[in-house]
Image (tube, grey):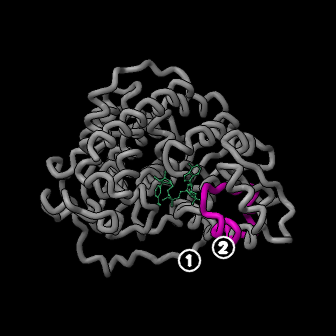
Amino acid sequence: MTIGVALFGATGSIGESTLSVIDAHPERFHLEVVSAHRSIETLVRIIERFQPKHVILTDQSEANALLEQLPKEFNGSLAFGEHSLAEAASASEVDVVMAAIVGGAGLVSTYAAVRAGKRVCVANKEALVMGGELMMAEARANGAILLPIDSEHNAMFQCLPESYTVGQSIPGLKQLVLTCSGGPFREWSINAMTDATPDEAVAHPNWSMGRKISVDSATLMNKGLELIEATHLFHVPETSVDVVIHPESTVHSLVEFVDGSMLAQLGSPDMRIPIAHALGFPERLDINVERVSLTKLSKLHFEPVNHAMFPALALARQASAEGGDRPIVLNAANEIAVDAFLKQQIGFTEITELVFDCLNQSARQPISSIDDVLAVDKMSRQTAEIWIMERV
Ligand SMILES: NC(=O)c1ccc[n+]([C@@H]2O[C@H](COP(=O)([O-])OP(=O)(O)OC[C@H]3O[C@@H](n4cnc5c(N)ncnc54)[C@H](OP(=O)(O)O)[C@@H]3O)[C@@H](O)[C@H]2O)c1
């Protein structure tokens, strides 16, 4: 019997890397479910290659478009909508859910997988940023096993004893150290960054990723989201998470213990490494990736973050410290801002300005359920959209 994988966000960058790992190990995995949003052509190629049993699209119109192109050999089911993702997440044939939808759109399906007590590989960091406390409580209550896919959190997890379960406190921990490449604008001036174009912002120096996370990496909001993610996954306050710039992206993160020991995980900047680690855990999967050559690494650099240039990280840290609805507002405003920047409606530095203003403008709301999370998310998106309309 092979392991049944549900791959949500199959047509994206993490989706592609996950398919590559599955393809390398057909004796271990089969694709039970795939989901996509708009990339029908890519989805058709995935169906032809992997013959998943269930295919889920966001909207009926996309599902209809796919119906016309479905390969003849496909004899699985086709469904659409968030409820279908939630249903698929809890199906008995699904052993592992790879949560790789980008943004808040992944919240409901990731949450459903956690509630179903599955092994959940969490790439969709925004879901944890928005609903981290609820998600971790559901994981504990339902026995779900969360495995981090973000290379930084996966690195930290790899530095912990095998007996460690995500969500528990870490015995003897001094601090977690998140490394950050600094993005494409690390050496730019603020003035130059003001006029940065979407193409310049998505040109990450080390990683090839989807457009949203690439822009987040350029503003350093990605590191802010990762900081919040780390507080939930490793059950620490934000004060226990440091961030350092490491332009080579070779040390993927570190864990420092009270006795002065620091453990780090190194590897090429290739997402197949954390994906293979999580899919295979606790075993190691042999995958064909570029190896780190220690003799070729002349020097590794570490430097502090320039907060004046990149204020998004401090905003996220503050949202994490304040908790409640703040991370939800931060995430929603950021998603709308990044989208507007990619559509050239606002400038690069306005992304963080917009997030700052939305956080200041919104009255705090109590959060005790996923419906509360979704309500704050919706309201914050509206506030952000009004900000943009008034600006353009
Ligand atoms: N890429 C990386 O190296 C990397 C590293 C660490 C963490 N992550 C995290 O992994 C997640 C995915 O990132 P990515 O870079 O793979 O993004 P991506 O390349 O943009 O792919 C996003 C995926 O989500 C689907 N999607 C988009 N909007 C959706 C919606 N409204 N409803 C349902 N599905 C939707 C897309 O479908 P269509 O293509 O069909 O539109 C696609 O399959 C993000 O949370 C990101 O922060 C990514």
Q: Residue at x 17, y 52 (%)?
A: 309
Q: Quadrant of residue 321?
A: top left
Position of residue 26 measured from the top left corner of the image (x, y, whole percent) = 74, 69
Q: Does 24 sit left or right of 356 as displayed?
A: right
Which residue shows up at 60% across the image and 30% down it? 138
Looking at the image, residue 43 sits to the left or right of residue 315; the answer is: right
Depth check: 162 or 244 in front?
A: 244
In the rendered image, which residue does mark 1 sit on? 288
Name which residue type carries label 2: Ala
Q: Quadrant of residue 357?
A: top left
Residue 37 among those drawn in magenta: yes
Disc 1 residue type (three-letter)? Asn
Tell me how far mark 1 sits from mark 2, CA to CA. 9 Å
CB atoms of marks 1 and 2 within 8 Å:
yes
Is residue 377 shown above or below 336?
above
Decide: is 235 above or below 282.
above
- Image quarter where the N terminus lies is bottom right
Secondary structure type for disc 1: loop
Residue matched to label 2: 24
Q: Position of residue 158 (x, y in %)?
A: 48, 54
Instruction: Name the residue at 43% across, 55% down.
Output: 155
Using the image as rendered, state which of residue 69 and residue 377 is in the foreground: 69
The stretch in magenta equals 22-45
Q: Is residue 257 visible?
A: no
Crowd rating for badge 2 (residues with CA inside 10 Å; few <14, some 14–19, many 20+) = some
